[in-house]
Image (cartoon, rainbow, N blue to C red):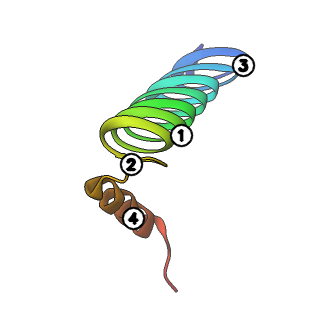
Amino acid sequence: MGVLAIGQASFGLVALGQAGLGLFLGLGQAATGLYAIGQLSIGVLFGLGQVATGEIVIGQVAYGKYVLAQLGLGEHAWSVNRADPEAVSFFKGLLTRFLIVA
């Protein structure tokens, strides 16, 4: 437990561990936080994982506002069965924002 918590079961501002319960960032097999990355990610703003939630979500099974997933549910989802034009535009824009063009 602490500001930066590392361990099998960790809780803190930034938590790294098998069960990472972070207030800001959770990184682990089961992670929570404003930003969550892990196999099971319960994020508020951003979730990335096999099963994920959040405002912006990327995962195999995902639920949120802007969703990129194999099986996705949300207001704007881009999945195998559905390609919402706003979701496609959002994620393509997100990708180009992080690509460095030489």
Residue at the spot 32% in from the left edge and 53% down from the top edge: 87
Which image quadrant is residue 43 in?
top left
Give the amino acid type for the residue marked by disc 3 in the picture.
Gly
Q: Are marks 3 and 2 in contact (CB under 8 Å)?
A: no
How many angstroms separate mark 3 from mark 1 (CA)?
Answer: 24 Å
Q: Secondary structure at mark 1?
A: strand
Q: Are marks 3 and 1 in contact (CB under 8 Å)?
A: no
- Residue indicated by mark 4: 92
- Residue indicated by mark 2: 82
Mark 2: few/some/many CA within 10 Å (<14, 14-19, 20+): some
- Residue indicated by mark 3: 7
Q: In the rendered structure, which disc, 3 or 4, sits on the residue that comes first in sequence? A: 3
How many angstroms separate mark 1 from mark 2 (CA)?
Answer: 15 Å
**Between 99 and 16, the one nearer to me in the picture:** 99
**Between 62 and 2, the one nearer to me in the picture:** 62
Point out the frontmost of discs 3 and 4: 4
Q: Secondary structure at mark 4?
A: helix
- Residue indicated by mark 1: 59
What percent of the width, then of the height, locates residue 33? 45, 25
In this picture, residue 4 sits left or right of residue 32: right
Give the amino acid type for the residue marked by disc 4 in the picture.
Lys
Give the amino acid type for the residue marked by disc 2 in the picture.
Arg
In this picture, residue 12 sits left or right of residue 76: right
Give the amino acid type for the residue marked by disc 1 in the picture.
Gly
Q: In the rendered structure, which disc, 3 or 1, sits on the residue that comes first in sequence? A: 3
Q: In the rendered structure, which disc, 2 or 4, sits on the residue that comes first in sequence? A: 2
How many angstroms separate mark 1 from mark 4 (CA)?
Answer: 16 Å
Point out the frontmost of discs 1 and 2: 2
Residue at the spot 31% in from the left edge and 62% down from the top edge: 89
Q: In the rendered structure, which disc, 3 or 2, sits on the residue that comes first in sequence? A: 3
How many angstroms separate mark 3 from mark 2 (CA)?
Answer: 39 Å
